[in-house]
Every structure is written in structure tokens, then in C-alpha cells.
Image (cartoon, rainbow, N blue to C red):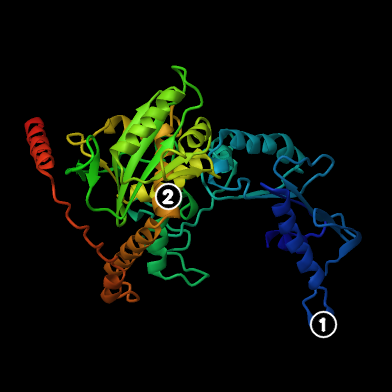
């Protein structure tokens, strides 16, 4: 508790504690106040020699009895008028990655520092900024990049020592490269590895290593997408114009609707995803600017083309609400989705699935849609003009890996990777028997559906067509 230490050294010190929320800042101040109140020599406790003034002891602002020193707690955005400070601690100026990813919030925090925090400092007053580096342009990034950035001393202790001694780099704790931080909560090497896999490189690097990566095109990196070479589908033997997937654990349709029909409006996007174990395959997509009537037609057509995708997710916003109301009595399985997070937050949540190679796109030679345009939009997010394909993909992957049955397969896969990494690193805790135990069971094969003569003819014709194109 740096604030308590400062007050024991000089009870005249006027301290400020700021955080993204008033309640959090008050919690920090309350902790310091309570430590002083309970360590007063009573009942054989340590006597710090400090007392809280009886008429000036609220959690928001309190003062020491007989001294001018004390603590004032504020949320970012609150004022400090008339309250000079001898030291200031800014702890977590952003609530989460979503706030740090917002240019509005970053500007708000920095403006508060320049117009409220800094002007209240007494000459020579120290300032401590403690934060998770979610974004390279956060408060710490702007302070260090400023003209007087040389005044700041940066202390960063990564969870995993990844310095390069050959470049003259050293670890703050004297660890060797590849050595994990000793966990106060008793985490093993295998558990650290599991955290790294499940978090994904972007979140892990920011949250655990203290080094944020740029947002531009980096939420879903272009090279993360894997390809599959053979079609998962074939012509349906009984339904003309429809496709049949013979082996899958889950199959969902995901839709993102536009707000209006103009040429400059967003696109309507409908996707079909197939999950096999811990892998998800995008098999088809509609991506067009459509009127409301044309949207209904496109929805009906995609549902008919993929009759096995009976769980049909529609974001309950924009035209989606009207689509749900119009079609729910005609097409079964329409599920309204009400997202509680931002587009950015939803994309970050499923990023580890894509980075791990569990989201696959068809090779252009077999694709039923433009996969390169899809990747271009995903790579440009969140700075692209349109993000409709990103929204639809986030919705589908969240359903399969965060909210639906695929979560178990994903967790089993992550545990297996973590255990394998630990065994390779020589950690004695996991065993190869444990690795085998984590392997998810193979799904039971679905029974073969005999093709009719007409179906056999279509199959032969399609095979000949693909061979000719290759």
C-alpha cells in the first residue's frame, strides 16, 4: 500500500487516488483508511501513529487527525478543484479492453489528466500510473510518447520472461528467458500455458506481458485463417438445389441485417457454419446490399439450401427484428440474439478460436463465396468501412464455442495443447496418460444415406465439373 507508506513517512502528504469509476477509487481509499483505523495500538495491534479525523473521514475524502495529510478519491471525469495534491496515483483508468479500444475514452482519460489531474499537483509531486496495457495509445502510451516522456520511469514485469539477452535486455526479476512468474495463487507451468492458449496472443500480450499490439488489422490477423481443401457438402439426394453435410457435431446459420436499403448502407450477411469437434468450417455466405423484401428472399433461399442448419441466429437489431417477426411462423429455428457487448468486444472474445486455427475457410477452388474479400474485411477490422462479416462470424463462433455445445470441445482442445506444451517444456506435473485422457471422443459416424439414381448422376456430374475446373 504505497499510500499508507507515504502517510507514515509524512502525515502532511495530501494524496489523490483516481480510477475509471468513483466506487473503485473509493474502495482503494477505504482500504487505506481502515488499515489506519485498525492499527492504532488497541488489542496489541501495531500502532502506526496515525488517526483519522472524526469529522473528516468519509471514504471519498478523509484527513488525518492533527495533520493536513489525507486521501481524496475520484473517478476519471470528476473534479479536483480546490484540492492540491502532493502525490497522485492513477489505478486502472480504463475499465476493460473495450474502453481502452475506444478513441473517445482514451481522449477522455487523457483530457482529464491534462485539465484536472496534472494542474492540481504541487511542485515535485510524484505520479504513479498503474494499468493494464490494453492499447498502445492508452494513458501510459501517450505519457511516454509526449515531449516530456523522458520524465516517466516505466516498470513492466511480464508474466513470462521473454527478453533477449543477446540484445542487452534483462528481466526485472533476474529470470531466464522462458521462465514464468512465480504465482502468488500457486499456478503451475501447465496452468500458465493454458492461460496463454485460451487468452490468445493479443489478450495475453496486453494483460499478462504489458505490451499491447496495434488495433489496426490486428484483432483477427490475416494469417490465422486455415483452409480446407475438400468440400464438406454434396448435392442433397432428395431436395433439389440443396446441400447435404454428412458428418458434423453442430450446424448453425448466422445473420446480420442492415439498417436501410441505400447504396451506402451496410451489407446483409448470412453465413452457414459447420462444427466438427473443436473446428468450425464456414461453408457458405450471402453478402449483399438488400432491401427488406430481398432480405426475406435471401434468408428463405439460404435456409432451403442448407436444411440441416436448423438453428438460425439473427441479431435482434436493425431489420433483424422485422425479419424475425415476419419469418418465425414460416421458417423454424429462428433464434433472436441480443448482444450485450460491443462489436469490438465480441470480436476479441472469439479471437483465440481463430488464432488457434479452429476456424477454417474453404479453399478458393471449392468456395461458394469470395473468401479473399471476407479475409480483407476481417483483417481491416476495426478500422474498415464495413464490419458486417465480422459481426456475423463473431455471432456464429460465440454460439459454437462460448455459449453452445462446442465450448466443451474447445476447452478439451485448449487443455490438451497446454498439457502438451508443459510436457515438452519438461514440467513433471502432467503425464502423457493425462494427455490421452484429455482427447475428446470421436463422434459417431452418421449412417450413409443411399443416393437415388438421379442423385448419383448429379454427384458424378459435380465431380467431373470440379475436376475440369482444377
Residue 237: % across, % down: 18, 43
Q: Which mark is residue 323?
A: none
Task: Please name whichever residue, 37 or 366, is drawn nearer the observer in this view of the structure.
Answer: 366
Indicate the position of residue 4 as horizontal and vertical percent values.
73, 62
Q: Residue at x 44, y 54 (%)?
A: 402
Q: Residues within 10 Å of mark 2 (few under 14, many from 20)?
A: some
Mark 2 = which residue? 399
Q: Residues within 10 Å of mark 1 (few under 14, many from 20)?
A: few
Determine whether, in the image, residue 206 is placed left or right of residue 389: right
Where does the image place residue 455, in percent across and percent down from the top left? 13, 41
Q: Which tag is nearer the camera, tag 1 or tag 2?
A: 2
Q: Residue furthest right?
A: 55
Read off the residue under disc 1. Answer: 43
Quadrant occupied by the N terminus: bottom right
Q: Secondary structure at mark 2?
A: helix
Name the residue located 26 percent from the left edge and 74 percent from the top edge.
Answer: 432
Determine whether the residue tagged by mark 1 lies in a helix, strand or loop. Answer: helix
Q: Is residue 451 left or right of residue 117?
A: left
Amino acid at each position: 500500500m504505497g499510500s499508507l507508506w507515504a502517510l507514515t513517512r509524512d502525515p502532511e502528504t495530501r494524496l489523490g487516488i483516481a480510477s475509471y469509476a468513483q466506487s473503485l477509487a473509493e474502495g482503494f481509499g477505504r482500504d487505506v483508511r481502515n488499515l489506519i483505523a485498525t492499527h492504532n495500538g488497541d488489542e496489541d495491534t501495531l500502532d502506526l501513529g496515525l488517526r483519522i479525523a472524526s469529522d473528516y473521514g468519509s471514504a471519498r475524502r478523509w484527513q488525518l487527525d492533527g495533520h493536513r495529510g489525507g486521501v481524496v478519491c475520484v473517478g476519471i471525469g470528476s473534479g479536483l478543484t480546490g484540492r492540491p495534491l502532493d502525490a497522485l496515483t492513477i489505478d486502472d483508468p480504463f475499465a476493460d479492453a473495450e474502453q481502452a479500444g475506444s478513441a473517445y475514452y482514451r481522449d477522455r482519460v487523457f483530457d482529464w489528466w491534462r485539465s484536472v489531474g496534472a494542474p492540481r499537483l504541487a511542485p515535485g509531486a510524484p505520479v504513479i500510473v498503474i494499468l493494464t496495457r490494453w492499447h498502445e495509445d492508452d494513458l501510459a502510451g501517450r505519457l511516454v510518447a509526449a515531449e516530456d516522456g523522458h520524465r516517466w520511469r516505466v516498470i513492466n514485469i511480464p508474466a513470462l520472461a521473454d527478453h533477449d539477452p543477446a540484445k542487452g535486455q534483462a528481466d526485472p526479476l533476474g529470470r531466464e528467458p522462458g521462465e514464468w512468474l512465480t504465482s502468488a495463487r500457486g499456478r503451475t507451468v501447465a496452468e500458465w500455458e493454458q492461460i496463454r492458449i485460451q487468452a490468445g496472443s493479443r489478450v495475453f500480450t496486453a494483460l499478462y506481458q504489458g505490451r499491447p499490439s496495434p488495433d489496426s488489422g490486428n484483432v483477427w490477423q490475416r494469417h490465422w485463417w486455415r483452409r480446407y481443401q475438400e468440400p464438406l457438402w454434396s448435392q442433397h439426394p432428395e431436395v433439389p438445389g440443396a446441400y447435404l453435410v454428412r458428418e458434423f457435431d453442430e450446424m448453425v446459420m448466422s445473420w446480420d441485417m442492415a439498417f436501410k436499403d441505400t447504396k451506402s448502407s451496410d451489407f446483409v450477411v448470412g453465413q452457414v457454419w459447420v462444427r466438427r469437434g473443436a473446428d468450425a468450417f464456414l461453408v457458405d455466405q450471402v453478402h449483399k446490399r438488400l432491401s427488406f423484401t430481398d432480405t426475406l428472399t435471401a434468408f428463405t433461399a439460404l435456409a432451403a439450401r442448407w436444411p440441416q442448419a436448423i438453428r438460425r441466429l439473427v441479431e435482434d437489431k436493425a431489420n433483424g427484428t422485422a425479419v424475425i417477426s415476419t419469418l418465425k411462423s414460416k421458417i423454424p429455428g429462428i433464434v433472436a440474439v441480443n448482444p450485450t457487448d460491443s462489436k469490438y468486444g465480441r470480436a476479441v472474445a472469439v479471437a483465440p478460436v481463430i488464432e488457434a486455427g479452429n476456424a477454417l475457410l474453404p479453399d478458393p477452388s471449392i468456395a461458394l463465396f469470395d473468401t479473399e474479400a471476407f479475409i480483407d474485411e476481417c483483417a481491416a477490422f476495426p478500422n474498415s468501412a464495413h464490419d458486417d462479416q465480422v459481426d456475423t462470424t463473431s455471432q456464429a463462433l460465440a454460439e459454437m464455442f462460448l455459449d453452445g455445445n462446442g465450448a466443451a470441445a474447445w476447452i478439451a482442445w485448449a487443455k490438451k495443447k497446454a498439457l502438451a506444451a508443459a510436457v515438452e517444456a519438461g514440467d513433471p506435473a502432467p503425464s502423457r496418460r493425462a494427455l490421452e485422457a484429455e482427447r475428446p471422443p470421436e463422434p459417431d459416424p452418421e449412417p450413409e444415406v443411399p443416393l437415388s439414381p438421379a442423385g448419383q448422376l448429379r454427384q458424378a456430374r459435380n465431380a467431373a465439373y470440379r475436376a475440369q475446373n482444377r
